[in-house]
């Protein structure tokens, strides 16, 4: 059974950096396409970033492009989301996900697996 476990969420000040991690267990991670989403209070879950199995291809939402970086370490079965210059509007629950292809993850409707989420709160 595939399970995703996020960690790294915390309360931070605007302008701070934070790195989220997601451990993937239960399958050969090196073949998995991974992504990150977040859900702000009172809003729908939104796509942030996705990465291909090899790490060679990535895609980002315009709202985080240039500030967030997705990466992976296949030897550790882990995908990361490095976030810099955090803003109060980045506050939300951040979810790790896995989907069929890099192009299909952003729509959020074809996700195979979700993590339980980790809370990020950015104070102004």
Image (cartoon, rainbow, N blue to C red):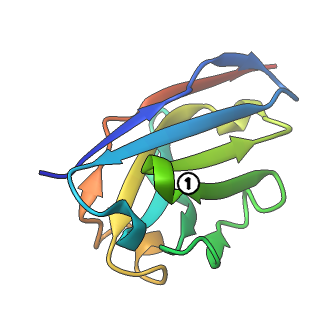
Q: What residue is rendered at 58% in x and 47% in y?
A: 80
Percent position (x, y) of residue 74?
49, 58
For the C terminus, give its image quadrant.
Answer: top right
Above or below — where is 9 with respect to 62?
above
Percent position (x, y) of residue 72?
57, 56
From the viewer's side, name the closer residue of 43 and 58: 58
Q: What residue is rendered at 48% in x and 32% in y?
A: 41
Above or below — where is 97 with respect to 58?
above
Q: What residue is rendered at 43% in x and 35% in y?
A: 6
Name the residue beneath numbered marker 1.
Answer: 73
Could you tell whether 32 is left or right of 19 in the image? left
From the viewer's side, name the closer residue of 75 and 83: 75
Could you tell whether 95 is left or right of 79 in the image? left
Q: What residue is rendered at 48% in x and 79% in y?
A: 102
Q: How many marks can you see?
A: 1
Could you tell whether 120 is left or right of 68 in the image? left
Secondary structure category for the residue under label 1: strand
Outermost residue, front direction?
A: 75
């Amino acid at each position: 059974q595939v399970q995703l476990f996020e960690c790294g969420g915390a309360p931070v000040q605007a302008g701070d950096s934070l790195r989220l991690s997601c451990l993937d267990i239960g399958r050969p991670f090196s073949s998995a396409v991974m992504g990150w989403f977040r859900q702000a209070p009172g809003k729908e879950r939104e796509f942030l970033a996705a990465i291909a199995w090899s790490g060679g291809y990535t895609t980002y939402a315009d709202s985080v492009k240039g500030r967030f970086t997705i990466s992976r370490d296949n030897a550790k079965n882990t995908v990361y989301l490095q976030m810099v210059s955090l803003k109060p509007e980045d506050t939300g629950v951040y979810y790790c996900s896995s989907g069929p292809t890099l192009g299909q993850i952003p729509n959020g409707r074809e996700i195979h697996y979700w993590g339980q989420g980790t809370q990020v709160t950015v104070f102004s």
